[in-house]
């Protein structure tokens, strides 16, 4: 009988059910009225008195162990079932959308400008931000004493030979002319650096997009039409442009480009300071000296170039009053461009 008790105890301890039904079945088989435990109790009645004490204790211990095990297993299986139920999702529930990031307004405008010129056949060219004197100044016909070379304007990294942060992306145009023969049609976006005091309208870092077109027979009329197309695409069909004579070392003739103020339609407002016009870029016919310095025959080829500040265009397009906002990356500012993807 002792052996039977031991065997039953071992079965109780090793019992590993997979479901609550199996536990119940086990309970009935062991602890039920006609179960194995009661059968043992029956047998116990006829045990010799000298063994009764010890065997009685063993049967009691077995009964307690079996009851405890059954209860514990029931609880365990029930918890697992309710956890599984909680995990079943309501598939018809509307999903929670991930908040979308937004593109920086400088990227938005840059992409838009690049797209417009891409439609005119321009490809994007890139170049380094750390440059040498040749690519930023000398190859572009800057005389040695030109004020832009001055420490006041340019951030120098090293002197003699000069290594500096590019002050305009015209350096990319020089690099393009170095390894590409005309026809050349490139647009050069990038960051530029000038030693200027930071204010609502200026920063020591800003973004430019410059363009260069060189081929046989390129004329000032081509320049004007390209820029008119660009202005209409960017600011709307009604936009007009006007060119004012200007000076750049690398273009001759040179001009500043104004667009009619899209806010007041040219009547005059506080954005255009009552003039009806907004200055957006510089341009001109590539100086023959620049073509020659870059190994292009200036008798055969001519070209035009233009350059604009992306912050300025973005300010005009979105009515941003302070240029510093573009660099602070305050999400309250950036989130206003969420839908402008
Ligand atoms: N490189 C000039 C600037 O940085 C812009 C420009 C480019 C002007 C090409 C004329 C032609 O201001």
Image (tube, grey):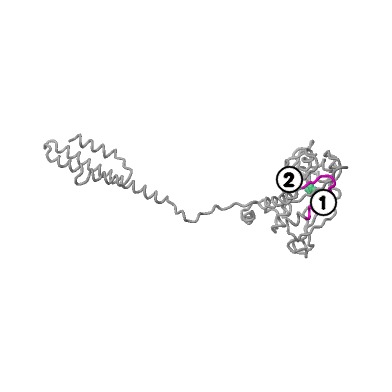
- Quadrant of the drawing holding the N terminus: top left
* Dot 2 and dot 1 residues touching (CB under 8 Å): no
Label 2 crowd (10 A; few <14 / some 14-19 / many >=20): some
Q: Which mark is residue 123?
A: 2
Q: Nearer the viewer, residue 134 or 37?
A: 37
Distance between mark 2 and mark 1 Cα atoms: 18 Å
Q: Is residue 85 visible?
A: yes
Rendering coords of residue 62 (x, y %):
22, 40
Q: Is 139 on the left or on the right of 314, as rendered?
A: right
Q: Which residues are magenta?
A: 211-228
The secondary element bearing badge 1 is classed as: helix
Q: Is 268 on the left or on the right of 95, as rendered?
A: right
Rendering coords of residue 261 (x, y %):
76, 61
Outermost residue, top direction?
Answer: 3
Q: Quadrant of residue 296?
A: top right
Q: Is 94 on the left or on the right of 214, as rendered?
A: left
Q: Mark 1 or mark 2, which is nearer the start of the sequence?
A: 2
Q: Nearer the viewer, residue 300 or 249?
A: 300
Label 1 crowd (10 A; few <14 / some 14-19 / many >=20): some
Please say whether residue 207 is one of the residues in the magenta stretch. no
**Image point (35%, 48%), residue name:** 79
Vertical order, 247 against 176 (above or below): below
Q: Which mark is residue 222?
A: 1
């Amino acid at each position: 009988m002792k052996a039977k008790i031991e065997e039953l105890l071992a079965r109780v301890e090793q019992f590993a059910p997979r479901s609550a039904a199996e536990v119940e079945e086990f309970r009935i088989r062991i602890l039920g009225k006609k179960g194995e435990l009661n059968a043992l109790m029956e047998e116990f009645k006829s045990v010799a008195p000298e063994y009764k004490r010890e065997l009685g204790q063993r049967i009691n211990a077995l009964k307690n162990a079996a009851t405890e095990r059954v209860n514990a297993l029931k609880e365990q299986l029930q918890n697992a079932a309710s956890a599984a139920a909680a995990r079943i999702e309501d598939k018809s529930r509307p999903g929670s959308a991930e908040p979308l990031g937004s593109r920086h307004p400088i990227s938005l405008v840059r992409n838009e400008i690049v797209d417009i010129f891409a439609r005119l056949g321009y490809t994007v060219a890139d170049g380094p931000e750390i440059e040498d004197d040749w690519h930023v100044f000398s190859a572009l016909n800057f005389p040695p004493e030109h004020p832009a070379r001055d420490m006041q304007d340019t951030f120098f990294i090293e002197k003699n030979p000069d290594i500096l942060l590019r002050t305009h992306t015209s350096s990319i145009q020089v690099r393009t002319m170095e390894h590409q023969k005309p026809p050349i049609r490139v647009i050069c976006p990038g960051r530029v650096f000038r030693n200027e005091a930071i204010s609502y309208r200026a920063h020591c870092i800003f973004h430019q997009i410059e363009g260069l077109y060189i081929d046989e027979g390129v004329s000032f009329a081509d320049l004007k039409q390209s820029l008119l197309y660009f202005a209409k695409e960017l600011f709307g069909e009604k936009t007009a442009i006007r060119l004012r004579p200007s000076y750049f070392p690398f273009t001759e003739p040179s001009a500043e480009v104004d667009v009619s103020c899209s806010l007041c339609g040219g009547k005059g407002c506080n954005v255009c300071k009552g003039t009806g016009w907004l200055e957006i870029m510089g341009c001109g016919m590539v100086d023959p000296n620049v073509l020659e310095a870059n190994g292009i025959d200036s008798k055969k080829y001519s070209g035009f170039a233009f350059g604009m500040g992306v912050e300025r265009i973005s300010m005009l397009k979105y009515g941003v009053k302070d240029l510093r906002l573009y660099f602070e990356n305050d999400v309250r500012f950036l989130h206003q461009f969420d839908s402008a993807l």
